[in-house]
């Protein structure tokens, strides 16, 4: 498959571009910044919030699918979040429709439902059929981007897989990550399954490894062929208890719902 990967220079992008190439896909990279020295392969330096720049990339490349990873990874003001997650997704979807590209895999986030309390969850697992419950403007923009994917799936039959990523890290760092960790290898597995699953339509999954202490249901991922192999449990004895663990573990968004993130939207 010839796949456009946005945010190719970012932490997830660097892993996914290499992982997809290793699995035989042809990667076309897109990022705000130029390629790292020595990068082999197609690379476009452009802002995917700029619809003309995005259209130019689609005009220059023959593409089968898009993996949209670009975007600010944390909390900023609302306009920044909307531009970074919703406008970029819109520019890509419009270009996909114009050029007949039928599949997008989107890096959504657990923060789309981050305000959900863990107490009272059936089996302790959050499913994908719950109401959006963002914990920040970041999470709100992820919810809106998911809405846009759903709209384009219904209007134009685009296949759109929204991966609500937990904590993408080389290794778990705090106790919350025992539930939320997504290993690098599992991330590549998740993206490849999302790219190659037959006709998923609009589909939401939780992007975590097969963690023994998971808070999120892995079935929506398994339903489209995502079979995670790693488990954060191997780090359980090595992670120290911290005073903030109880608060961070009471809602699925960890620290993001906390008052230190409160600010005016505009
Ligand atoms: C995310 O979506 C963020 O991009 C990342 O910075 C982490 O906060 C992660 O979620 C997480 O919840 O650990």
Image (cartoon, rainbow, N blue to C red):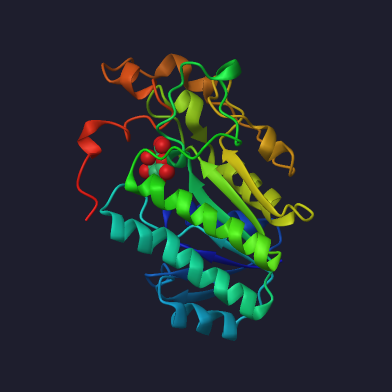
Examine the image and state in which quarter residue 186 appears: top right
Relative depth, front residue between 211 and 146:
146
On screen, 250 above or below 204?
above
> Residue 60: horizontal and vertical position, in percent?
58, 85
Q: Is residue 264 left or right of residue 59?
A: left
> Residue 200: horizontal and vertical position, in percent?
73, 52
Residue 117 visible in the picture: yes
Residue positioned 71% across, 55% down in the render: 201
Residue 41 visible in the picture: no
Residue positioned 56% across, 34% down in the render: 130
Residue positioned 27% across, 52% down in the render: 76
Relative depth, front residue between 251 and 132:
132
> Residue 17: horizontal and vertical position, in percent?
56, 59
Give the residue at the far right of this rendering: 198
Q: Is residue 13 left or right of residue 81?
A: right
State how many labels appear: 0
Examine the image and state in which quarter residue 160 appears: bottom right
Residue positioned 54% across, 38% down in the render: 183
The N terminus lies in quadrant: bottom right
> Residue 249: horizontal and vertical position, in percent?
39, 21
- The picture quadrant for ligand 1 comes to top left
The C terminus lies in quadrant: bottom left
Relative depth, front residue between 90 and 2:
90
On screen, 75 above or below 131?
below
């Amino acid at each position: 498959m010839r796949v456009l990967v946005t945010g190719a220079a970012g932490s997830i992008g660097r892993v996914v571009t290499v992982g997809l190439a290793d699995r035989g896909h042809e990667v076309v990279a897109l990022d705000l910044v130029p390629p790292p020295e020595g990068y082999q392969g197609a690379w476009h330096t452009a802002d995917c919030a700029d619809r003309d720049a995005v259209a130019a990339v689609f005009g220059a490349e023959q593409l089968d699918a898009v993996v949209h990873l670009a975007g600010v990874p944390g909390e900023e003001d609302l306009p920044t979040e909307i531009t970074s997650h919703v406008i970029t997704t819109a520019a890509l979807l419009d270009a996909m429709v114009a050029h007949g590209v039928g599949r997008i895999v989107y890096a959504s986030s657990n923060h789309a439902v981050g305000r959900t309390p863990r107490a009272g969850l059936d089996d302790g697992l959050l499913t994908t059929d719950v109401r959006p419950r963002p914990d920040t403007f970041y999470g709100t923009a992820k919810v809106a981007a998911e809405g846009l994917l759903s709209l384009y799936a219904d209007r134009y039959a685009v296949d759109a897989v929204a991966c609500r990523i937990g904590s993408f890290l080389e290794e778990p760092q705090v106790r919350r990550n025992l539930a939320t960790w997504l290993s690098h290898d599992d991330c590549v597995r998740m993206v490849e399954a999302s790219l190659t699953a037959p006709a998923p339509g609009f589909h939401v999954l939780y992007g975590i490894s097969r963690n023994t202490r998971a808070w999120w249901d892995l079935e929506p991922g398994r339903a489209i062929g995502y079979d995670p192999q790693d488990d954060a449990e191997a780090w359980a004895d090595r992670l120290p208890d911290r005073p903030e663990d109880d608060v961070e573990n009471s809602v699925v968004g960890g620290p993001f719902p906390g008052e230190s993130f409160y600010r005016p939207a505009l």
